[in-house]
């Protein structure tokens, strides 16, 4: 899978040379394989730990957003999670994963789609996204992402999103990115989601470059819980009486 051309991905490219569409851009990124892309992980240990600690039932369904050729799907199948789905805008990245899995690829749902326009065929108990959300630099894209997250996730599902940390890179694969801390990403997801845990990680690219990541684990609050919390807040609000003449 490796190529002598792949190191070009580690150097930021001017926006002017980025392909005219997201799909064309990521097809170009994956043209030389997947083991040399900057976000490659031989084993996604932190994602697996957070998925396990989420408490989501192994049969609630997991969708890996932007999963592409990631080895997370292999590990989830090994650990007995089902159903598992992988979504990516790049058909080449999905083909790498399917070819790697061989006959086990039949146990996975593969979606070639943009996460902001994806139409989910079912709901999933856990939404995993390592390094897609931080590419959405336009506010309208982020709103569309969150709307699809709500449509795709079960009412009490878990969300794991990993982005570049506030001291992480400002560009990746020739594109600008947004960096996040807990306050900033919580504001993007809105009150439907409660932050359970934040974990920092320094990822080293295949070329050895360190990249600061933040992993955010959210829980979607069921509607009844949100109403109960809102009612409790109303009941406990302290009202200061005004002086009457």
Image (cartoon, rainbow, N blue to C red):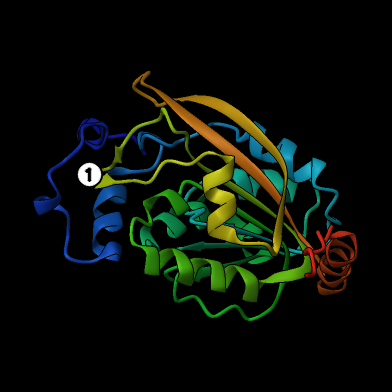
Question: Measured from the top left, where is residue 160 in percent x and y?
Answer: 64, 49
Camera-side residue of 201 and 48: 201
Above-or-below relation of 42 to 221: above
Q: Residues within 10 Å of mark 1 (few under 14, many from 20)?
A: some
Residue at position x 60%, y 38% in the image: 215
Question: Measured from the top left, where is residue 99 in percent x and y?
Answer: 49, 54
Quadrant in the picture for residue 11? top left
Camera-side residue of 83 and 96: 83
Residue at position x 55%, y 35% in the image: 214
Does residue 132 show up? no
Above-or-below relation of 161 to 192: above
Residue at position x 50%, y 32% in the image: 213
Quarter of the figure that contains the N terminus: top left
Q: Circle 1 sits on which residue?
A: 174
Residue at position x 74%, y 36% in the image: 49
Above-or-below relation of 142 to 76: below
Q: Residue furthest top?
A: 208
- Please indicate whether residue 43 sits to the left or right of residue 31 in the image: right
Camera-side residue of 134 and 238: 238
Question: Measured from the top left, where is residue 59 in percent x and y?
Answer: 83, 62
């Amino acid at each position: 899978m490796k190529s002598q051309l792949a190191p070009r991905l580690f150097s930021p490219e001017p926006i002017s040379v980025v392909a005219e569409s997201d799909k064309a851009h990521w097809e170009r990124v994956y043209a030389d394989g997947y083991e040399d892309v900057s976000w490659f992980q031989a084993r996604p240990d932190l994602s697996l730990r957070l998925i396990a600690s989420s408490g989501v039932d192994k049969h609630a369904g997991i969708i890996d957003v932007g999963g592409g050729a990631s080895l997370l799907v292999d590990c989830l199948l090994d650990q007995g999670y089902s159903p598992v789905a992988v979504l990516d805008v790049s058909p080449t990245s999905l083909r790498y994963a399917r070819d790697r899995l061989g006959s086990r690829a039949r146990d996975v749902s593969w979606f070639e789609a943009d996460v902001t326009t994806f139409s989910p065929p079912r709901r999933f108990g856990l939404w995993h996204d390592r390094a897609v959300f931080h590419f959405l630099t336009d506010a309208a894209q982020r709103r569309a992402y969150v709307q699809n997250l709500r449509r795709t996730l079960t009412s009490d599902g878990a969300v794991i999103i990993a982005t570049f940390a506030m001291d992480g890179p400002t560009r990746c694969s020739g594109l600008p990115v947004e960096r996040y801390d807990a306050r900033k990403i919580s504001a993007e997801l809105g009150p439907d989601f409660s932050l359970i845990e934040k974990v920092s990680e320094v990822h080293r690219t295949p070329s050895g470059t360190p990249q600061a990541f933040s992993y955010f684990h959210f829980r979607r609050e069921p509607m009844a819980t949100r109403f109960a919390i809102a009612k409790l807040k109303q009941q406990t609000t302290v009202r200061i009486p005004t002086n009457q003449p």
